Image (tube, rainbow, N blue to C red):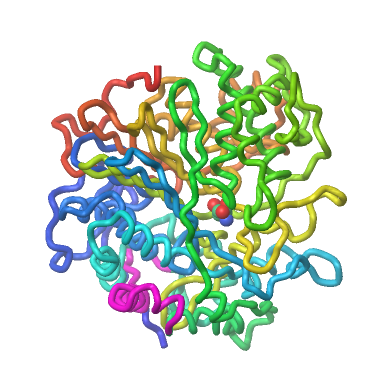
Amino acid sequence: MRRTRLLAGVSTSVAALLVTVLIAPSADARTRPVQPPPKSPTATGYGGAVSTVDPDATRIGIDVLRRGGNAVDAAVAAAAALGVTEPYSNGVGGGGFFVHYDAKSRRVSTIDGREAAPAAYREDTLTENGRPIPFADAVTSGLSVGVPGTPLTWDRAVRRWGTRSLRQNLAPAADLARRGFVVDATFRQQTADNEARFRDFPATRALFLPNGELPEVGSVLRNPDLARTYDLLGRGGVAEFYRGGIGRDVVRTARRPAVDPASPRMVRPGLLTTADLASYTAPERRPTRVSYRGLDVYGMAPPSSGGSTVGEALNVLERSDLRGAPAAQYLHRYLDASNLSFADRNRWVGDPAFGEVPLAGLLSQRYADSRACLLDPARALPTPQPPGDPAVRAEGCTAGGRTTPEPREGLSTTHLTTADRWGNVVSYTLTIEQTGGSGITVPGRGFLLNNELTDFDFVPLTPGVPDPNLPAAGKRPRSSMAPTIVLRDGRPVLALGSPGGATIITTVLQTLLGRLERDLSLVDAIAAPRASARNGTPQAEPAFLASPEAAELRAMGHAFTSTPEIGAVTGIEFGRHGLLIAAAEPARRGGGSAAVVRPSRRAGGPGRVRTIGR
Ligand code: GLU
């Protein structure tokens, strides 16, 4: 049955979406006519803040804060809204990592909502006849669907730290799904990029190709199935998902994806069972922490490589004078610190339940110093660099082991950041892996299934070198998600994160450095042209490649490949006396949406840029 209706002709334009207006005091969501909410990439003020890639999600988060909810309530409500408006990047069919700062205890905690492999998974599950399954085939398959972690993450976060029920927090997103959202150019383009495979799954076609066509920019897309899913989760709790009817539908769909009989597509069936769903947990994990020039940088521990890799790179850079360095020298060090950290990440980081990850070593200053001395101020490091061994107490520079090639990863996902009037903060990255996930929608439930298990290495990356990221029963594939919170003396100064597969790590690092070392405002640090080095050939955006620094970097031996866009950051900076500076992308992915509960008199700009942490 077709459940999505498309109303053509709602007049709007992308330009109209970009008007710089702060969110006005809320009208009751039920009486609000459907219209594109205004959005701004930066907002300054008090009483709470939300930054997401999407104006509906930000509006809903701000609304929750205005009604007395805290940062966790706002984060869950905004995430649920992103499940409506950004369904190709996240949703209840996926997973993520939730980082929380508790103002009372001044502690940072995290929830690991990463998808887990079914119990039937084996080391060779992603191979056939001894060879890796073609990556694109694995993406669009039931086989790469892991147990979704997002519903349990929301439930845990709300029970542990929230002030409202899951039902209350899901209600605005259910309402949004019912009323619909206005399709923008980014959504249409993402649908177009997925059109061929979406057409092959009748449930996906019905939901995202209304009347069999790409949704028009300015039309309204509704998802009443997802509204009902949210209602069910709200009323019956996440047991509806992990032990109930929604879960049974997830399992049935993953095991036997319904493909259009007219399509020649061969879709590999999944291995997920109801027992896999029933035994899923979303554990709290100790965050990673490095101290960087008097700041404490907290991130996500394994199975994500986000915290350890950002952390190691910061430690590597700590002995360099990045503040005083000319721009090209600063970028040179950023690129090579990234290369060294990625060499270690690829060799050492995987699900810690399946093999020891030398996390303390990777995060230690002593180990970073032994890597930092490999940096040459005049020449780019040849790549790939071999990993070091953090277990060895190194004196001087570490001699490397054997190199591992760069694994491949998708380019989807979303990040949101929230803060409340009590000082609590959430930095939350969530995903369904590829843009559009597996491409498989659960019929009647309104959401796409993830393809997260393609984040495993299908075969050992380097023969003879142990690979911590091979598939196994119940294992979580290594992630790059890097939700980050920075404290000074136990109080937040900055929180941010980004999508972008493995480029998440470099984007978070580059944005942190732009703000902390180069005195850019947060929004300018976000907007700065990006490059991403991951121990292979670095990628860079066209604006980066056109800069004078790029020419200097090339002369030092850095060779770049061009890529249109890297990442989509959202973040919040914490100023004096409760001042909040929320920021998002001015341009990438069509621009993000930052808002505050109570704007300062000077709305809009980030104000004078203050130096953080010195
Ligand atoms: N699956 C990726 C990860 O966990 C994120 C997906 C993406 O951003 O492309 O690292």
* Residue 140: % across, % down: 63, 70
Residue located at (53% from left, 73% from top): 279
Q: Quadrant of the N terminus?
A: bottom left
Left or right of 588, for residue 125: right
* Residue 550: % across, % down: 62, 24
Residue 239 falls inside the magenta stretch: yes
The vertical placement of 274 against 180, above or below, is: below
Residue 122 falls inside the magenta stretch: no
Pick whichever, 246 or 30, lies toward us: 246
Residue located at (73% from left, 28% from top): 393
Determine if residue 472 is in view. Answer: yes
Pick whichever, 75 or 565, lies toward us: 75
The vertical placement of 246 against 551, above or below, is: below
* Residue 160: % across, % down: 33, 57
- The quadrant holding residue 320 is top right
Q: Quadrant of the C terminus?
A: top left
Left or right of 362, for residue 310: left
Residue located at (57% from left, 84% from top): 258
* Residue 419: % across, % down: 29, 43
Determine if residue 411 is in view. Answer: no
Question: What span is in magenta?
Answer: 215-244
